[in-house]
Image: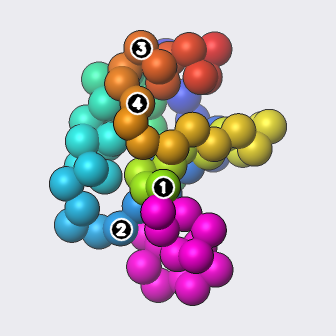
Amino acid sequence: MPIAPSTIELYGISCCHLREEAQAILRDAGIVAKDINIADDGGLLEKYGMRIPVLRRMDNGAEPGWPFDTVAVVRFLA
């Protein structure tokens, strides 16, 4: 069963190959995340710019940064 987009967010920048890799990992894990482009938000760019892509759990605020794989993502959301 897919994780609801309201449960997890993916922070990154459009046209970034690492973001595309992270999106593929999420798809492989059956996860639909809300995609957040940080390029248009100075605060988010400052907070996440050196760590992207970053996953964020909305229920507890946990934020693993790159690199991660399918196994790590599934564990993170368990």
Secondary structure beneath disc 4?
A: loop
Q: Is residue 5 visible?
A: no
Q: What segment carries the magenta color?
A: 35-50
In the image, taking residue 56 as reference, residue 53 lies left or right, namely left
Q: CA distance from mark 4 to mark 3?
A: 8 Å
Q: CA distance from mark 1 to mark 4?
A: 12 Å
Going from the N terminus, do you reach mark 1 or mark 2 first? 2
Residue 58 x/y as whole percent: 72, 44
Is 27 above or below relative to 50? above
Identify residue type, mark 4: Phe
Q: Do the numbered discs 1 and 2 sit on residues whose CB atoms are within 8 Å?
A: no
Secondary structure beneath disc 2?
A: loop
Q: Do the numbered discs 4 and 3 sit on residues whose CB atoms are within 8 Å?
A: no
Secondary structure beneath disc 1?
A: loop
Identify residue type, mark 2: Ile
Instruction: Give the colour scheme of this rendering.
Output: rainbow
Secondary structure beneath disc 3?
A: helix
Going from the N terminus, do you reach mark 3 or mark 2 first? 2
Is 41 above or below relative to 61? below
Identify residue type, mark 3: Val
Number of the front mark, 1 or 2: 1
Disc 3: which residue: 71
Disc 4: which residue: 68
Q: Do the numbered discs 3 and 2 sit on residues whose CB atoms are within 8 Å?
A: no
Q: Looking at the image, which residue is at 80% across and 37% down?
A: 60
Disc 2: which residue: 13
